[in-house]
């Protein structure tokens, strides 16, 4: 089966700086892949290159088996059959919702019946039928976003690109929209490349996540695998909430630097300088794993509903922990870590 | 699409304007009040159309001609002043008027004298420079009689800048001819001591200065003074005892004209009774010219018996830049 | 010349330049040149070449010698011109006038902007609309109206309102400063007004909470924040006065107050033309303008308060209490002096036989207006052709500017600031210099000399000149509007398969329609009254209205001149107003929040 999107050795420099360096990426049909990275990591540039709104310096880009960019030939964006949902939605303010959907179809030369059918279908699945004669300025942010997606869907693209589509929404709406949006996309079986800088977004929507670092992909894997086994400290750092503790690792043990407690048991066989990955939810009461205990002083605490989030000083280093109660600031705390969750990364 | 077809329409409209222009039989540059009216009468009489281009003063008209350089756009030019006409002929901007044209015109004696050796132009009328005096400011016994009396009015003498006015240059060159250049310069230096009055841009402004009392006397084209007298203003024209040089209106033909026949017809019309009548049908300055055609009398108020001197156009033309510059440096603010 | 276009343009362009700097560019150098070429070519032919011809004469004085061209470089003429006391005096005059007016007009405009933006006032409508109306009346008409009012036999003297000393003083520096100030304060008012709009009250509130007095707030907070706008206003007005020809050829001319622009005109109005003198003065004038524009760029690079955004909260409105009456009366006095007084003078003069007999019943006549309105008269023909020329100019200038703007926008990157800089420079080129350049180009340079279209001596070249004069600011206005469109709007259409023309016509044009319409109407109105080009490039078919008006005035036919001016103003006002209403209705797409710039949804 041909990949829905295939990028090989795509490089791009802007003003002398490498934005993408020999990047490779393959997205399968029907798959949702996120590009997750900080600003400047090249994720938006890659997205624009796939769309055809920017051109790489070298490499090959194929969409649905067709090479849309290589050193010799370029397919114009309007010929690529790619849909894109922009960060600001880019709804045409002077057109109604229905017109926003039909405009592109008309340009593609479809007949009126086909256009009507597709627009109605897209409006229906996006639950926008009642709003079809409204102008974008008369819609809420969530509705605007659904219009943007419906506009894409109506074009029946072989690939849909999402450029941080949730970043303009506030937190409460965001989660609902995320689910609704993905439900829509999944129902239509569309292939999606989704750019975001938000780890939660990426985790929630993706089949696979590509973590981008300085123009290349640091790790490409399912959300769960990335969470459980980040490939390196960069990835681990990027997944929010993880604490990384410096120390000495040996075969099956780890000793945090600057702390005199006993070494922790781990499942790693690395030796030398290492980083212990501590996920907040991994902290257990002292007695759960009595041989794997760390001691610390509570520096700050914040109530989070299900638990307390503590900032704990272990020797000179700080950890973020989820804890069932909120000890007073300055009090001592002892907790244990399950050995099988103690992942050690080489520095 | 709309925008594009708009642009096309606009271009078509502009092209239409071009076509319409190209159709005129004659293009005339002029700085004379009656020229437009005469052109209408000419069209009525002959059916030939004339585009009348009036950039403004004589200076502005000449400037346009000069800027056009070797690409003159006019067929005929009609201005006050013989020196500039001679100069344009020397620069090959004008072609000599064919000799036979002069033969068909019934010139008066004065008219004959004003026909230039070079055939640079056809004189169609004349005026001269006089001293304009506000009779409410100057009692009869103090009335100036010639240029030599003007120092008594120093500071209150209005004059045109020869750099802007063809007639004014004719006057300046005339003074240098009658008084000698050095004496002429010395005289003017004692007379024109108020720069705000000695650098005026038009005869109208000289009139204004005298009528408002800013100046008591002025050096002005006599037809401008006569026009004001005719409209009832309290001024008189004093012809200087030293004599004053004639200022012919010259009608010249472009060296590049493709309409020589039409130009000939225009000259014939202007020098005909009908043309001369058209030149007098109005109240502005230039309508009060001194006729040069036998049997034609000037408008009421235009004296017929003025003694005129004749400018040595060659000298005047040769020193034009230098003398204008001298005037500018000394008398124009 | 152009006025708020310039200020708006400068201000908007600043934003546009910033925007384009931050936007990533995908343009390779090949695309860069391909996109840039038509723009450069157009600017070169329409502006660069004529300008160059004028300037080069300063150092190659024999270039256009009627008795044979002489290509030798010879700075003697330039040095001689610069050493001449006349040129020195006109430089001093120009600088004196421009400096004085920059200060007075900025002060008056600032006060006006403050009144309009920050105070509750009676008769607000009159005061708010004033700057716009004044701005749309050409300077030479105001100047001529003031001549009617202030001359020794004028209306004010007739009513005994004018002490002779004041009348004397008027025709000189004080009068010029006075009339210029009343004519140019709208520019300052637009510049400072837009800065004040952007300057919300939050800074003020913060200062007040921190204990600053109201005066302290203005001196320490709002003042510094407005400083760039103040500087901009001073600079723009300074440049405007330097390159003004309308006042220079009317009041300044009749008071023998020589300034550079008129000096250029005078040097070009002689036989033979003093080409080196004209070129030298043009060079000096242009250098001064360039220095000013550079100063502006420098200043704004240093002090660019990004805080002044369009997103501030509504500003505090001051309640002036009992003071509002005297303040409003002062506003009305300015209105009368700047607009209604001159307008009334023109109306009265248009409907009377002679100036000297004043407002007597038997002096009233409809002859002047009848002549201006009757078909077949020269005056009427001038008005008619001016309206046609202006309409064609507006269509061409705006159409071209729109296409160029879209093209530039598509390329993005470094080109935008370059073109904006070029346009701003071109806006500052005095019309009189450009007009003179056109005469030279179309008469002396082979290729142009024989050009059939546009051809020298007919309306096509005049319209070309008008377009050249109008294009830069049309480009600035439209480019700014296009630059404000989120680029994603076009990209979205592109990805939907919409082609280039479709995107221009169905996405870009509808969204910038109001800006295009604004540029169109301003161009139209400006062109009907454009003086220097009209004067320099008089078509053989007859002069355009501005040169006709001026000519009638200088031929003591000020009654007909006033009637023609009045008719032109009424006609332009009616056409412009009607077009604006229609477009406004057409463009009102039920857009409650009009600008598709950024959307913060909640």
Image (cartoon, coloured by chain):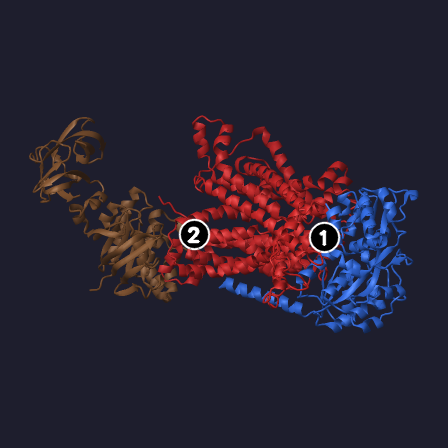
Chain colours: A brown, B blue, C red
Of the pair A47 and C261, the residue shown nearer to us: C261
Q: Chain of mark 2?
A: C
Quadrant of the rendered image containing residue C208: top left
Q: From the viewer's perspective, is residue A311 above or below residue C567?
A: above
The secondary element bearing badge 1 is classed as helix
- Residue C585 in the image: x percent, y percent? 52, 53
Q: Which mark is residue B63?
A: none
Quadrant of the rendered image containing residue B286: bottom right
- Residue C262 in the image: x percent, y percent? 67, 50
Apparent side of residue C18 relative to residue C424 in the rendered image (left or right): left
- Residue A244 in the image: x percent, y percent? 18, 39
Q: Which mark is residue C485?
A: 2
Apparent side of residue B110 relative to residue A269 in the rendered image (left or right): right
The secondary element bearing badge 2 is classed as loop
Are the residues under marks 2 and 1 on the same chain?
A: yes
Q: Residues within 10 Å of mark 2 (few under 14, many from 20)?
A: many
Reading the image, the residue beneath label 1 is C561
């Amino acid at each position: 089966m041909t990949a829905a999107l295939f990028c090989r050795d795509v490089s791009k420099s802007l003003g002398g700086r490498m934005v993408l360096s020999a990047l490779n990426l393959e997205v399968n049909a029907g798959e949702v892949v996120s590009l997750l990275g900080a600003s400047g990591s090249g994720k938006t540039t890659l997205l624009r290159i796939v769309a055809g709104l920017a051109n790489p310096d070298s490499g090959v880009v194929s969409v649905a088996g067709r090479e849309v960019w290589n050193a010799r030939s370029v397919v114009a964006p309007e010929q690529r059959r790619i849909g894109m949902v922009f960060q600001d939605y880019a709804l045409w303010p002077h057109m109604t919702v229905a017109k926003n959907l039909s405009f592109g179809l008309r340009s593609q030369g479809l007949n009126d019946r086909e256009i009507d059918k597709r627009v109605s279908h897209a409006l229906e699945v996006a639950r926008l039928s009642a709003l079809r004669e409204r102008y974008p300025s008369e819609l809420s942010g969530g509705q605007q976003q659904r219009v943007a997606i419906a506009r894409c869907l109506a074009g029946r693209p072989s690939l849909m690109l999402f450029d941080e589509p949730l970043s303009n929404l506030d937190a409460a709406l965001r989660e609902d929209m995320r689910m609704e949006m993905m439900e829509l996309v999944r129902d239509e079986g569309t292939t999606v490349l989704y750019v975001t800088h938000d780890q939660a977004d990426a985790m929630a929507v993706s089949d696979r996540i590509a973590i981008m670092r300085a123009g290349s992909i640091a790790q490409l894997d399912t959300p769960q695998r990335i969470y459980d086994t980040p490939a390196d400290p960069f990835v681990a750092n990027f997944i929010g909430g993880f604490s990384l503790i410096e120390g000495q690792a040996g075969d099956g043990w780890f000793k945090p630097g600057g702390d005199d407690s006993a070494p922790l048991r781990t499942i790693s066989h690395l030796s030398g300088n290492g980083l212990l990955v501590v996920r907040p939810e991994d902290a257990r009461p002292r007695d759960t794993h009595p041989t794997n205990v760390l001691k610390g002083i509570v520096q700050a605490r914040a109530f989070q509903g299900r638990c307390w989030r503590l900032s704990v000083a272990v020797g000179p280093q700080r950890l973020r922990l989820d804890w069932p109660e909120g000890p007073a600031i300055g009090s001592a705390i002892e907790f244990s870590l399950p050995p099988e969750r103690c992942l050690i990364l080489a520095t | 699409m709309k925008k594009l077809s708009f642009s096309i329409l606009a271009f078509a409209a502009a092209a239409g304007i071009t076509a319409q222009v190209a159709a005129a039989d004659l293009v005339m540059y002029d700085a004379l009040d009656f020229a437009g009216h005469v052109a209408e009468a000419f069209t009525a009489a002959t059916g030939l159309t004339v585009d009348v281009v009036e950039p403004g003063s004589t200076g502005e008209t000449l400037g346009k001609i000069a800027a056009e350089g070797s690409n003159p756009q006019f067929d005929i030019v009609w201005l006050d002043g013989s020196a500039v006409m001679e100069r344009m002929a020397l620069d090959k901007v004008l072609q000599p008027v064919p000799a036979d044209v002069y033969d068909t015109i019934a010139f008066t004696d004065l008219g004959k004298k004003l026909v230039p050796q070079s055939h640079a132009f056809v004189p169609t009328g004349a005026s001269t420079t006089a001293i304009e005096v506000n009779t409410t400011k100057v009692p009869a016994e103090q009335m100036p009689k010639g240029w030599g009396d003007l120092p008594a009015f120093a500071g209150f003498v209005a004059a045109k800048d020869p750099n802007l006015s063809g007639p004014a240059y004719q006057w300046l060159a005339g003074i240098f001819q009658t008084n000698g250049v050095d004496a002429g310069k010395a005289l003017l230096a004692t007379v024109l001591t108020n720069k705000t009055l000695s650098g005026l841009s038009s005869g109208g402004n000289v009139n204004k200065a005298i009528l408002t009392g800013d100046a008591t006397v002025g050096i002005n084209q006599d037809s401008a003074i006569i026009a004001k007298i005719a409209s009832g203003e309290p001024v008189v024209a004093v012809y200087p005892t030293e004599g004053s040089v004639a200022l012919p209106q010259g009608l010249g033909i472009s060296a590049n004209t493709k309409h020589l026949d039409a130009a000939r017809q225009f000259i014939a019309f202007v020098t005909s009774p009908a043309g001369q009548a058209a030149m007098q049908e109005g109240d502005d300055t230039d309508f009060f010219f001194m006729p040069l055609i036998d049997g034609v009398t000037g408008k009421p108020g235009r004296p017929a018996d003025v003694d005129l001197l004749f400018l040595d156009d060659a000298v005047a033309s040769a020193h034009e830049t230098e003398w204008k510059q001298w005037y500018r440096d000394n008398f124009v603010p | 010349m152009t006025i708020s276009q310039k200020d708006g343009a400068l201000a908007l362009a600043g934003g546009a330049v910033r925007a384009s700097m931050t936007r990533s560019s995908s343009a390779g150098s090949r695309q860069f040149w391909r996109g840039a070429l038509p723009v450069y070519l157009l600017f070169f032919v329409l502006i660069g070449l004529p300008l160059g011809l004028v300037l080069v004469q300063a150092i190659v004085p024999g270039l256009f010698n009627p008795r044979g061209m002489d290509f030798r470089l010879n700075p003697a003429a330039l040095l001689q011109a610069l050493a001449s006391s006349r040129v020195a005096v006109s430089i001093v005059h120009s600088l004196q006038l421009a400096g004085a007016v920059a200060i007075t007009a900025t002060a008056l405009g600032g006060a006006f902007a403050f009144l309009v933006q920050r105070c509750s006032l009676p008769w607000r409508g009159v005061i708010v609309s004033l700057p716009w109306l004044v701005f749309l009346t050409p300077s030479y008409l105001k100047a001529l109206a003031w001549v009617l009012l202030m001359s020794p036999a004028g209306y004010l003297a007739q009513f005994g309102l004018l002490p002779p000393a004041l009348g004397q003083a008027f025709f000189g520096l004080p009068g010029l400063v006075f009339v210029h100030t009343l004519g140019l304060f709208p520019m300052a008012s637009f510049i400072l007004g837009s800065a004040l709009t952007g300057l919300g009250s939050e800074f003020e509130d913060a200062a007040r909470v921190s204990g600053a007095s109201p005066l302290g707030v203005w001196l320490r907070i709002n003042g510094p924040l407005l400083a760039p706008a103040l500087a901009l206003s001073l600079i723009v007005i300074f440049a405007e006065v330097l390159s003004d020809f309308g006042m220079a050829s009317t009041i300044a001319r009749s008071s023998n107050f020589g300034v550079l622009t008129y000096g250029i005109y005078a040097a070009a109005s002689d036989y033979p033309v003093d080409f080196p003198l004209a070129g030298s003065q043009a060079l000096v004038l242009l250098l001064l303008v360039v220095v000013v524009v550079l100063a502006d760029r420098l200043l704004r690079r240093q002090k660019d308060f990004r805080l002044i955004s369009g997103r501030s909260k509504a500003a505090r409105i001051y309640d002036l209490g009992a003071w509002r009456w005297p303040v409003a009366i002062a506003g009305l006095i300015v209105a009368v002096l700047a607009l209604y007084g001159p307008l009334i003078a023109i109306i009265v003069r248009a409907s009377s036989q002679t100036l000297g007999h004043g407002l007597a019943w038997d002096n009233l006549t409809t002859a002047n207006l009848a002549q201006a309105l009757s078909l077949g008269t020269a005056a009427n023909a001038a008005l008619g052709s001016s309206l046609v020329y202006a309409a064609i100019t507006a269509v061409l200038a705006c159409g071209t500017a729109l296409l160029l703007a879209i093209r530039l926008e598509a390329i993005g990157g470094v080109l935008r600031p370059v073109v904006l800089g070029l346009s701003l420079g071109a806006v500052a080129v005095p019309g009189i210099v450009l007009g003179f350049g056109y005469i030279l180009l179309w008469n002396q340079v082979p290729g142009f000399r024989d050009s059939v279209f546009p051809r020298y001596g007919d309306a096509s070249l005049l319209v070309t000149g008008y377009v050249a004069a109008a294009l830069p600011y049309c480009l600035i206005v439209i480019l700014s509007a296009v630059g404000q469109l989120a680029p994603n709007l076009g990209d979205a259409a592109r990805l939907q398969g919409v082609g280039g023309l479709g995107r221009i016509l169905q996405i870009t044009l509808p969204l910038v329609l109001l800006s295009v319409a604004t540029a169109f109407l301003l161009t139209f109105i400006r062109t009907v009254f454009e003086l220097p080009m009209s004067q320099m490039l008089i078509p053989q078919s007859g002069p355009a209205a501005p040169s006709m008006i001026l000519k009638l005035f200088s031929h003591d036919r000020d009654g007909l001149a006033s009637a023609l001016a009045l008719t032109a103003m009424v006609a332009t006002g009616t056409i412009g107003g009607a077009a604006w209403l229609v477009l406004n209705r057409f463009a009102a797409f039920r857009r409650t929040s009009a600008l598709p710039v950024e959307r913060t949804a909640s």
